[in-house]
Amino acid sequence: MSERSAWLEELSQEGYVGDAATIVAKAAQYFPGQLALANSFGLEDLVLQHLALPYREQIKSFVLDTGRLPPETYDVIERWRIRYDLSFHILSPDATALESFVAAEGPNAFYQSIALRKRCCEIRKLEPLERALSDQKAWLTGLRREQSATRSHVRVAERDTAGRWKISPLAHWSLEEIKAYVDVHKLPYNPLHDKGYPSIGCAPCTRAISPGEDVRAGRWWWETDQQRECGLHARQSKETPYAAQSAR
Ligand code: SF4
């Protein structure tokens, strides 16, 4: 087994806890030029992006511009671009698919049904994500186990549905730890976080939460918790044995 495979096997153990900066550094070392960072500019992704700054040549940072992000998110993208001299790959939805969808279903189709909401996420997020990852072998995400019931079993390294390695160095971090890192390093962040938005996605699909509510409760708030994911973080079948997987 190669050094990289042994490292990935260690990270893929249930409940693995490791130093996030070391994990980012090793990921950059093991996947040079084949590692992406999907930055939504949520607090977790700010931490990840900051940890990835020394490896900007090895890590491709990209942003999914759905066209429906709140203005505050565009502002924070711009602040990061300027402060850290970063050039993000900013991906837009396929224009033909989006125009057909909006013509057929209207601009706010996501409120009509779960199926239409998922279709909107497919066009605005999933297809651009696949484009961004098509030439990558691994990607970094800011997933944390305490974010929601659907994320409680996140592993630090696991396969996505396409078989790429999805590495989540902050899986065991608490929200307090994330906020403390952002404070200590004075990272530019979305001001909506100070207005009751712990998790920020597209403007029409995100609302502020009340004290005590689940941190993901403001995302697609009209749906139940089991439905409230956009598919970006679908997992490969748990039945896939590690031994049958080789590091890509
Ligand atoms: S979050 Fe809402 S607006 Fe954004 S892609 Fe999904 S359904 Fe569409």
Image (cartoon, rainbow, N blue to C red):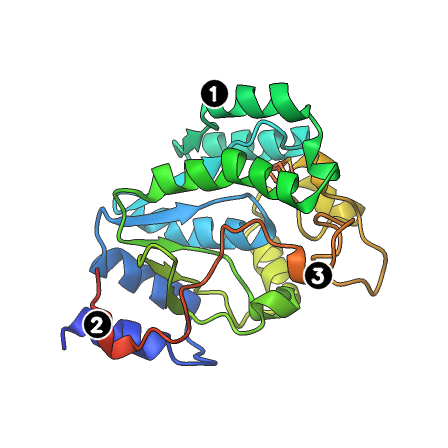
Where is residue 179, by image quadrant? bottom right
x and y percentages locating residue 132 in the rendered image: 36, 39
- Residue type for callout 1: Ala
How busy is the neighbourhood of tag 1: few (under 14 within 10 Å), some, or many (20 plus)? few
Residue 112 x, y percent position in the rendering: 74, 37
Q: How many angstroms separate mark 2 from mark 3 (CA)?
A: 34 Å
Query: Is residue 189 in view?
Result: no
- Tell me, for residue 225, which label it has, or none: 3
Identify residue for label 2: 5
Above/below status of 146 relative to 105: below
Corner quadrant of residue 28: bottom left
Mark 2 residue crowding within 10 angstroms, few (<14) / some (14–19) / many (20+)? some
Of 61 and 112, the residue lying toward us: 112
Q: Quadrant of ligand 1?
A: top right
- Of the numbered discs in the image, which one, if any, rests on residue 132? none
Quick check: 159 above or below 35? below
Q: Is 8 positioned to the left or the right of 224 in the image? A: left
Q: CA distance from mark 3 to mark 1?
A: 31 Å
Q: Residue at x 45, y 25 (%)?
A: 94
Residue drawn where x is 49% and y is 56% of the image: 233
Q: Within 10 Å of the Cα at label 3, are there few (<14), some (14-19), or many (20+) other Cα atoms?
A: some
Q: Earlier in the sequence, mark 1 or mark 2?
A: 2
**Looking at the picture, how far across and down is residue 92, in whole percent?**
47, 27
User: Which residue corresponds to mark 1?
Assistant: 95
Answer left or right for 184 relative to 194.
left
Question: For the C terminus, which image quadrant?
Answer: bottom left
- Residue kind at label 3, given as amino acid type: Asp
